[in-house]
Image (spheres, rainbow, N blue to C red):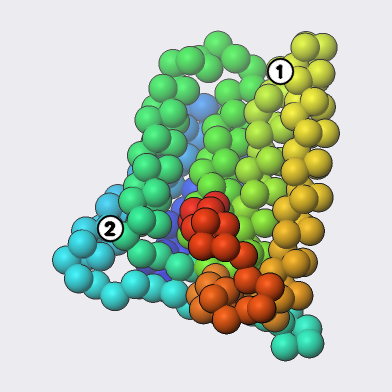
Amino acid sequence: MEQTLLIIVLAPLAASIIAGFFGRQIGRAATHSITIAGVAIACALSVKVLLGLLDGAPVFDGPVYTWLVSDGIRMEVGFLVDKLTALMMVVVTFISLMVHIYTIGYMRDDPGYTRFFSYISLFTFAMLMLVMSNNLMQLFFGWEAVGVVSYLLIGFWYTKPTAIFANMKAFLVNRVGDFGFLLGIAGVVHLTGSLHYSEIFAQAGRSPAAPSNCCRVSLAAATR
């Protein structure tokens, strides 16, 4: 399943890179065809994963790449894909696919046509990294990536003062949330010594400073 999950995540990213760097050279039709194809592949494979899990396939929970180990704490790119995650993958990729198709007409006369397709494909990649993460560090990366692309989309028409004001306001508000997010991650690592969801939840009930059941349910819902 690991290769399938990598394709789901990387197909929209590859399409976004092609559209962003080579959109003007390959033209509008090729740009929207490539980005739609990338998201369509991710959507089809997400449906396949969901159907497999519904048929009894095992939950996938494992690292794909380890980029840093510090004092026993592993910072990894990894996926946790169960039925709920797979359902969210289908929702994200299907809605993104519909947005891509709608954008062909909506942005038809806009000079930033290829740039917009690059942004929404990149947004899909960021959402998938967030939804599929199996650790808090990747969750934070996905959250930040969604924030960056949201900033770019809100200020897409950058010649309009209202757009610039709106994306700056969103940027500043998100930074406040990011600070709290990082404090929360630091507190969890201090208590559990891990960034991995399964290890954190396994220790939650045994920790002398463990949160209440209500708090644990809320944390689980927020990270899934």
What whole-number distance in Å separates the C-alpha atoms at marks 1 and 2? Answer: 37 Å
The quarter in which the N terminus is drawn is bottom left
Q: Name the residue at 44% across, 36% down.
A: 96
Q: Residues within 10 Å of mark 1 (few under 14, many from 20)?
A: some
Location of residue 197 by image quarter: bottom right
The residue type indicated by label 2 comes to Leu
Quadrant for residue 53, please give it: bottom left
Residue closest to the eye, 100 or 53:
53
Q: In the structure shown, which secondary structural element does the residue marked by tag 2 occupy? A: helix
**Does residue 43 show up?**
no
- Extreme residue in the bottom direction: 72
Give coordinates of residue 154: x percent, y percent: 68, 25
Question: Picture coordinates of residue 179 (x, y %)?
Answer: 81, 50
Q: Give the foreground label among 1 and 2.
A: 2
Q: With respect to residue 125, does 32 lie above or below?
A: above
Q: Nearer the viewer, residue 128 or 223?
A: 223
Q: What residue is shown at x 43% (from left), y 47% (from top)?
A: 38
Q: Amino acid at mark 1?
A: Trp
**Left or right, 26 with reference to 112:** left
What numbered label is drawn on residue 50? 2
- Give whichever of discs 1 and 2 has the lower sequence position: 2
- Which residue position holds label 1? 157
- Residue displayed at 75% across by 29% down: 170
